[in-house]
Image (cartoon, helix red, strand yellow):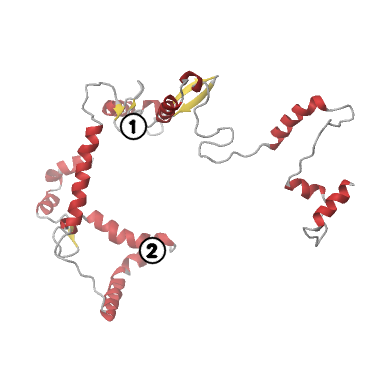
Amino acid sequence: MYHQQMHNLKTEHPEVQKHFEEGFHVIRRSDCLWAALSPDLIIEQVLMRSLQTSGGLTGGRGMTEQQRLLGVLSIPACAEVNQAMEGLTGVNYNTGEQNKDMTKTRQARDWKDTLTVPSYLQQRNPFTSDPSLWNIATVEHALRSINVDTAWSVGIAILKSVDRLTPAEYAFKRKDQAVTLSMKFSVRINGDQIQVDPQLLFQRLVIAAQKCDELELALTYELSSYPPALFDSSLLLQEANKPTLAAAIWDLIRPYVTADNVVESSQNVLDGGALVQRIPWSHGSTYKDIPYATSIQSM
């Protein structure tokens, strides 16, 4: 849309086109060479920075109409105060004539970054005779469902489906969008729909092939870098399900329970909660009294 507006600028807004040709599309903040910046960048670095920093409108003052007017109209007064403080303290902001991009250090770093690009492409040549779609960084080949290379046709099809429909009538569907390499595909295992990351699966298969002599035996196990029974996908420990654990323990010891509900050769396990529930804690008792109270109760 921006390209279309700029292309029609000469016919629709000739006065704006004239200002652009005369160089009025940039702002110069200093006397340095190549110090002219576009107005939108100046607004972001000057006006918006003052609004978003500590003490600004978005930093605690609020965004009401009165507060916005006070913030904008007080900028000239703040500039005068800042200039007076600089004159009082003798601290001035001066700029040199040379642009920082012309320094030897900056040129050496830019040249090093320039050489990095051809070196990277030499190791991962994208201009091969292979017609398949694949990622040159991870060497991950795309599935047949990946159609990001035809994103233009996909977008045209979506626009045609939107034509002559109101926003309330049309609903965007995920299946109509372009499928990229980063999207996970799903497989059905034992009736459950499982999301699979192709890159992660490929990495685990490569590691298993290099580290294991019997690859067929290794693939019979779950290729996971963490135990999913204990951790979730964000590597956070799953919440304990104590009722389920108690029921499982009871099922294991049920064959050893006698008629008097006594378990043969049983042992009692106490945790912190058991101490709070079983032992009488009198007011003002110390840690030394806890073992004594435990021995009295067991007697």
**Element under disc 1:** loop
- What residue sits 42% from the left and 24% below the top? 209
Residue nearer the viewer, 227 or 65 = 227
Figure check: 230 above or below 109: above
Residue nearer the viewer, 102 or 207 = 207
Residue labelled with disc 2: 56
Left or right position of 144 against 261: left
- What residue sits 28% from the left and 81% below the top? 88
Circle 2 packing at 10 Å, graded few (<14), some (14-19), many (20+), is: some
Residue nearer the viewer, 252 or 60 = 252
First in sequence: mark 2 or mark 1? 2
Figure check: 82 above or below 63: below
| Res 62 visible | no
Circle 1 packing at 10 Å, graded few (<14), some (14-19), many (20+), is: few
- Circle 2: residue type: Gly
Which percent across, then down, holds residue 31?
15, 65
Which percent across, then down, holds residue 180?
35, 30
Residue nearer the viewer, 23 or 265 = 265
| Res 192 visible | yes
Which percent across, then down, holds residue 2?
22, 42
Left or right position of 121 against 195: left
Which percent across, then down, holds residue 11?
12, 43
Number of marks in picture: 2
Figure check: 294 above or below 208: below
Q: Which mark is residue 30?
A: none
- Circle 1: residue type: Thr
What distance separates the C-alpha of mark 2 from that of mark 1?
A: 44 Å
- What residue sits 78% from the left and 28% below the top? 253
Residue labelled with disc 1: 138
